Image (cartoon, helix red, strand yellow):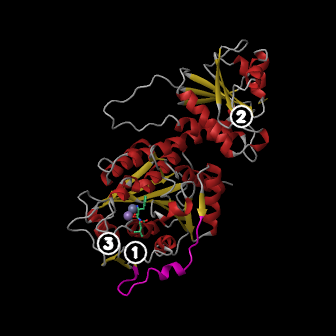
Amino acid sequence: MEFTIKAGSPEKLKSDCVVVGVYAGSDLTASAKALDKAADGAITALVARGELDDKVGATLMLHDLPGIAAPRVLLVSLGKADELTDKSYRDAVGAAAKQLAGSVAADAAFILTETELPHRDLAWRISQAAQILKDSTYRCDELKSKREESKKGVKKVVFIAKAKDTAPLEAALRRGTAIAEGMALAKTLGNLPGNVCTPTYLATTARKLAKDHKIKVEVLEKGDMEKLGMGALLSVARGSHEPPKFIILNYKGGKAKDKPVVLVGKGITFDSGGLSLKSTEGMFDMKYDMSGAACVLGAIKAIAKLGEEINVIGLIPATENMPGGSSIKPGDIVTSMSGSTIEILNTDAEGRIILADALSYSKLFNPEYVIDVATLTGATVIALGTKRAALFTNSSELQEALTKAANNSNDFCWSMPLDDEYFENLSTNFADMANVGPPEGSFGASAYFLSRFTQDVKWAHLDITGVAWQRGKDKRSTGRPTPLLIQFLIDHCNAKKP
Ligand code: BES
Ligand code: MN
Ligand code: ZN
């Protein structure tokens, strides 16, 4: 989908479809009023007759109204004018996107962005709308033998906005588009099955990114990991026939002296649980256990596309977690890259084991911040559901910045405690720490385990098990929290500018 911005009167727009908002109680927005006037009150009459539901996101497509240049007008309910929220705006845009996707109109003039929202400027509204509209065209059908080719659907959208200086709006448009593209990559990787999206596939994807953008990629093989002493990561890979990969992406948009932000993504391309084998149902969706890695790839793709002046490193420890004759066994003790020893009591708590080595490796970059993103525990879904990712951090600065970025990108998280007491759960007679403790407090212990490998850096951990995957009949990868990561990086970059 292509986007542009221009000014224009709604009734004169030469477009296949004009999209405008209507508030509850037959209260027309400015553009709807302009159309209504040109059409001799036709819209008022239809709305007064109750043809358009008052509920946010209800739509009504009108055809061939007199006095209006465009052959279609799509009315979208915004709810009550004084009750508008980010969510109602996004829902209304989403509903419009759905209608446009199924319409024979090839292009549309989009004026919903004129909707005033508390604390949100036009740039934000345009960026969100671009993201939602582009995201609505996402498909993952590459593995179907017959793809449904739909000729329907709007291909070009013009945002109608009056502004003296359109540069900030153009920038917002580019940002929204880049976020949607980053999300699309993350979604596709999450949706692809484990027999396609292997550690090698992730490495190939990273190499492709490097070819198309200003990103450098290095992939460490098993032998390299051995030399580095990554005994933790390698222990998880032992049961699998797929070779593990340690992927390093390096985007240098900032000055050479700027410390990088390091993003670390869990890249378990299939989590069977290992010898602590999961149940059949427990394994159903375990192809999405590389969603952290997928978001890191998506976020770095977007940042590189936008050419942000910031240095970002992406680290992806990638492997399968499988049972086999060489698998690690409960009770085995391994030595991580940091030198700490880990007693592996449950081979299904593998995410923290591979992240331990990736977090140790992140220190080589002298980072400003380290943020890991991982589908680490089922407990996250119980605690927070699917709306918010769990945020654990040792830095109030990061807590504030990530929370702000989450709220601005509509990709939410919630802070969880990182108390020392959680570590007591992981004590063992035989090694420096165990990888699991008793079930009480296991959520906190999972994050505390990671914190042992990030002691001297400002670090945050996002447990994304709930937000990364939509459950149920229409199950699929959501691409989250790619928008949050991108927003955080953009904010960080802007904060540095004089
Ligand atoms: N990848 C899983 C977490 C997960 C659970 C992702 C459900 C998606 C849906 C992780 O590796 C895992 O198995 N965690 C265990 C930890 C436990 C053994 C301490 C869990 O949450 O059950
Ligand atoms: Mn597991
Ligand atoms: Zn896992």
Q: Amino acid at mark 3?
A: Gly
The CA distance from mark 2 to mark 1 is 53 Å
- Residue range of the region highlighted in magenta in the rendering: 415-433
Q: Indicate which quadrant contains ligand 1.
A: bottom left
Q: Residue 54 — which label?
A: 2
| Residue picked out by circle 3 | 231
Within 10 Å of the Cα at label 1, are there few (<14), some (14-19), or many (20+) other Cα atoms? many
Residue 306 forms part of the magenta stretch: no
Q: Secondary structure at mark 3?
A: helix
**Mark 1 CB within 8 Å of ligand 1:** yes
Mark 1 sits on what residue? 435
Hey, what amino acid is under mark 2? Answer: Asp
Q: Main secondary structure of the magenta part?
A: loop
Q: Nearer the viewer, mark 3 or mark 2?
A: 2
Disc 2 packing (10 Å; few <14; some 14–19; many ≥20): many
C-beta proximity under 8 Å, tags 2 and 1: no
User: Taking the image as drawn, is residue 224 in sight?
Assistant: yes
Pick whichever of labels 2 and 1 is earlier in the sequence: 2
The mark closer to the camera, 3 or 1, is 1
Q: Residues within 10 Å of mark 3 (few under 14, many from 20)?
A: many
In the image, is residue 362 above or below residue 302? below
